[in-house]
Image (cartoon, rainbow, N blue to C red):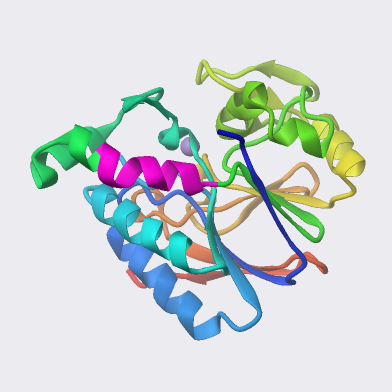
Amino acid sequence: MINRVFTSNIKNVFAAGDLHGNYESFSSILNIYEKNRKDSVLIFLGDYADRGSNGVEIITELSKLIDTREDIIALKGNHEMYKEGRPFFYPCNLIYEAEEKYGSWEVFYQDTVLNFLNRLHIAAIINNVLFVHAGISLRIKTKDDLVKHTNEKYLLWSDPSSVQGEHLNPRGAGVLFGEDITAKLLSSLDLKMIVRSHEPEKAANGPFTEHKGKVLTINSCSLYGKPFLLKIDTKSLKFKPLFLKE
Ligand SMILES: [Mn+2]
């Protein structure tokens, strides 16, 4: 299986951050998007299950949407890292949730999760913006580097830091990357901004910018504060949060 990067020239993008089993947010995001979807794309940034109680429903419904709609895409998060049904992250509540609702993790994995995982993109490049679940690293220098399996862990686990350069990430996976690394990669890809999630707590009250406005963190899960859907013009870089109903 090869990692894929979604590309488009559509200007208006709606981006949703970590959901972590929060069905109310998922449903509210779809409602808002359906009302505003003309000439737009909706991108989910990953981490669909675990923590909240409706990962099964979100994955089942989102899987159907990305199978049937060209304007809705889903990126892979670190909570979508499985090999033969075994998770490479913690906690994985989805297994217990599926046992409870389906009677079997193996059946749910084979029937639904596997197809969902195969349909995910590793990143999206739309006009001036790179969309990715977590972050970047020094090892990623070109568009081809984005799809290399050896680089997946950086895209799915890394966090931006106020310290220049690249350092160990206390998560034990991915790296901490400084503004110099952000600037270098954006310039080599001819892009202007990175939109990511992975640290929704940073965006508890709205979009959180760092690295001189070049990295934007978003939150769409009520567990981490006021959830919102980000509306962004990927050409002018103008953005605004559309806060979800409580
Ligand atoms: Mn994450």
| Residue at 60% over, 22% down | 174
Q: Identify the image quadrant of the N terminus.
A: top right
Residue 46 rendering spot, x and y as whole percentages: 48, 46
| Residue at 50% over, 21% down | 171
- The answer to which image quadrant residue 42 occupies is bottom right
Q: Is residue 246 above or below residue 108?
A: below
- The answer to which image quadrant residue 84 occupies is top left
- The answer to which image quadrant residue 65 occupies is bottom left
Q: Which residues are magenta?
A: 109-120
Q: Is residue 90 visible?
A: no
Residue 230 within the magenta-colored segment of the rendering:
no
Q: Count of labels shown?
A: 0
Residue 146 rendering spot, x and y as whole percentages: 72, 35
| Residue at 55% over, 46% down | 197
- Main structural element of the magenta stretch: helix, strand or loop? helix
Identify which residue, 107 or 8, lies in the foreground: 107
Residue 118 within the magenta-colored segment of the rendering:
yes
Q: Is residue 38 left or right of residue 16?
A: right
Q: Identify the image quadrant of the C terminus.
A: bottom left
